Image (cartoon, grey):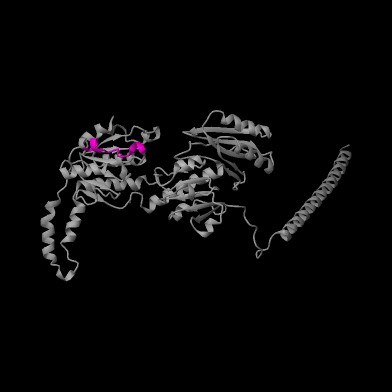
Amino acid sequence: MLAATRNNFARTARQLATVNARGLASQATEEIQMLERLLQEAKARSETAPKQDEEPLKAGPKFKIGTFNAISPLGLERFSKDRYEVLPMQTEVADQEEIHGIMLRSFKLGSSDVPDTVRAVARCGSGTNNIDVEALSERGIPVFNTPGANANAVKELAICGILLSARGVVEGIGHTKTLIDKDDSKNDYPKIKKQVESDKKMFVGHEVMGKKLGVIGLGHIGASVAQTAIDLGMEVVGFDPAITLDAAWRLPGDVLTRANTLAELCESCDFITLHVPYMKATHHLIDATLLRKMKPGCSIINFARGELVDSSSMRQLYDSGERTGRYITDFVDESLHDHPKVITMPHLGASTAEAEENAAGMAAMELMDFIETGTVQNSVNFPTTKLERVSGESIRICIVNQNVPGMLGLIMSTLGNIGANIIQQINTSRGSIAYNVIDIADTLSAEQIASVQDDISKLEGILSSRVVSARSEPGFFKLNK
């Protein structure tokens, strides 16, 4: 019995071994066949791949960014070279290209300087007085600025201005130069040194610690100046009736006093620094009435805009002896430039390598965000708008129209008439401008997209429309004239 059982086990073992051997052989054959197939595919790819000395495939169309003025190269590096090309404006090359965006600094930009293909304009700085914003708004073109990019640079110069107004530094330097003859052979330096030491009493100043500083305008720069002045031991009072919530959060807490009126601020301060934009409402913000309310020795620091101060009235007060405080500014004024209490310098507020780089980089990012996604951030004429892209294939349409009732309904009806499947949309407005960003399913042909854009452009009140390709190419753009 035992022998029979052993024989059965042996027979079963031989059968299993035979089956395993056949299975392993079959598996090995399949693996060899798969390897041969992979080798054949790799050989085929190698034969069809371009050789090293062959010309590579050309990239798709790029966005063209035109520049006025010298823009920081480090800032311009934000533009990816595979998607963007930067060209200086007012050149033969730029005249032959389709410009999609413009970057500038101080160039005076009129509507005629902006080609019809331009989607947006970005100023590397906070002020936009050199840009015809109203005309561009009427054409449906957003204008961006870079608030805060140069805040530290301007803050440092403003603090410098406060110190210059408190001490006779500039006057002392000027006096010392008058004692040194251009012909060095005539200079008796031991005598000059004694004279300079003796004359220092002519330039006695006062310290800023414990003095009161009035900050008019509490945005990025004003808030930063206030904080640094507090660190210097000054008492700070601020005034800004149009302060935003974001700006309010930047203020240095309980140590800054808020004035209810400009008159209240002007009556009590030893120094006043201006950090507000220039517009009709701020023309001669510091007028004759406020100048007379100030302490006679109150010094004014103005690195914002020259037109904020009534310079003719200030000159009259200087000439009559009613005003003795210094005026520090980086704007030349015909009424004040020759007065000894006025220190005028070039417009140096943002003239640092760091500020120029920050402003250029920020402007580049704003242009890229708008061109590629329709996002609006830091625009002076368009509402802040951001719509996250949905997953999957979609086409984005950006439409600018007059802010009048019924426009959104007309736009949606026009898209519905062609069978567009609207995935998501956002509608925002600012003043006379309304802005729409609409994502539709990528089910329409290029011809259908062009057709519906043409239909939208024919609606009364449409200023411009743009189709943003999912492939980040220039896409379709239509500017209504």
Q: Is residue 458 left or right of residue 262?
A: right
Numbered label tally: 0
- Residue 291: quarter of image: top left
Q: Is residue 207 visible?
A: no
Residue at 70% in and 59% down: 49
Residue at 25% in and 32% down: 263
The C terminus, quarter of image: top right
- Place of residue 359 in the rendered image (x, y in percent of width and height, measured from the top left): 42, 48
Residue at 43% in and 54% down: 69
Residue extending farthest bottom? 185
Instruction: Note whether 140 is above or below 357 in the view shown.
Output: above
Q: Is residue 94 visible?
A: yes
- Place of residue 202 in the rendered image (x, y in percent of width and height, measured from the top left): 12, 52
Q: Nearer the viewer, residue 45 or 233?
A: 233
- Place of residue 254 in the rendered image (x, y in percent of width and height, measured from the top left): 29, 31
- Residue range in magenta is 280-291
Q: Nearer the viewer, residue 80 or 284?
A: 284
Q: Nearer the viewer, residue 387 or 331?
A: 331
The N terminus, quarter of image: top right
Q: Is residue 123 magenta?
A: no
- Place of residue 271 in the rendered image (x, y in percent of width and height, measured from the top left): 23, 40
Q: Is residue 288 magenta?
A: yes
- Residue 32: quarter of image: bottom right
Q: Is residue 477 left or right of residue 430?
A: right
